[in-house]
Image: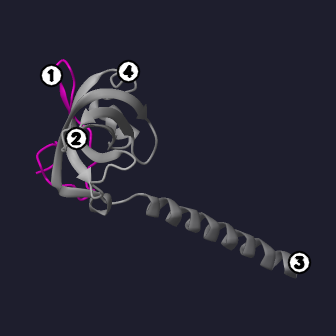
Amino acid sequence: MISRRFIVPTMIGAGLLAAATLGVGQASAHHAFSAEFDGKAPVLLRGKVTKVEWINPHAWVHLNAVGPDGQMHEWMVEGGTPNTLLRAGIDRNTLKAGTEIIVRGYQSKDHSCTPVCKANGRDVTFPDGRKVFMGSSGTGAPKDGADPTEK
C-alpha cells in the first residue's frame, strides 16, 4: 500500500513534467519577426507560385520572382498560420501552382539568397486585383498598414 501511495503521485508528476518539457520545445520553435526578417528591407515580388506548404506554425508560399538584384530567384515567403490564411480567404485553391501573384513583404536578414531567398509576406495581390493580408499579427513586424487589426 505504501508503495502505491508514492508511485501514483510520482507517475503523475513525471507526466506533467514531460508535458511541460514538450510545450517549451514547441513554444521555442515559433519565432518573432525580428529574429529572422529585416524590417528595413521591404520587397515587392511578382511571380508565379511554384508550391505552397500548409504547415504550422507558418505556411510557406514558394514562387519564382525577380529579386532586389534584378535576377530571377526562387523565393520562400512566410505567411501566417494556415488558420490565419484560411480566415483571410486564402486556401489551397486560391494559391495553386502557376498563379501569378504580387507579394509585399520583408526580406530575411540573410540577403544572400542561398540556397533560396526568404521573405515574410505582409499581403498578397491576386490576378483579379484582390489584396489579402497574409502575415501574422503580433510578431514584431513593422506596422505598415497591411494588418487590418493594427490601430
The answer to whether one can see residue 31 in this image is yes
**Dominant secondary structure (helix, strand or loop) of the stretch shown in magenta:** loop
- Judge whether residue 101 is colored magenta: no
Label located before the other in sequence (3 or 1) = 3
Q: Residue furthest top?
A: 128
SS under mark 4: loop
Q: Which residues are magenta?
A: 124-151
Query: Mark 3: which amino acid?
Result: Met
Q: Residues within 10 Å of mark 4 (few under 14, many from 20)?
A: few
In the picture shown, does residue 139 fall above or below 64? below
The residue that mark 2 highlights is 67
Q: Residues within 10 Å of mark 1 (few under 14, many from 20)?
A: few
Pointers 1 and 4 in contact (C-beta within 8 Å): no
Q: Residue furthest bottom?
A: 2
Q: Residue at x 37, y 45 (%)?
A: 116
Q: Is residue 69 left or right of residue 56?
A: left
Quarter of the image for residue 70 reads: top left
Query: Mark 1: which amino acid?
Result: Gly
Label located before the other in sequence (4 or 2) = 2
Query: Mark 2: which amino acid?
Result: Gly
SS under mark 3: loop
Distance between mark 4 and mark 2 Cα atoms: 26 Å
The residue that mark 3 highlights is 1
Label located before the other in sequence (3 or 4) = 3
- Judge whether residue 133 is colored magenta: yes
The answer to whether one can see residue 147 in this image is no
Label number found at residue 129: 1
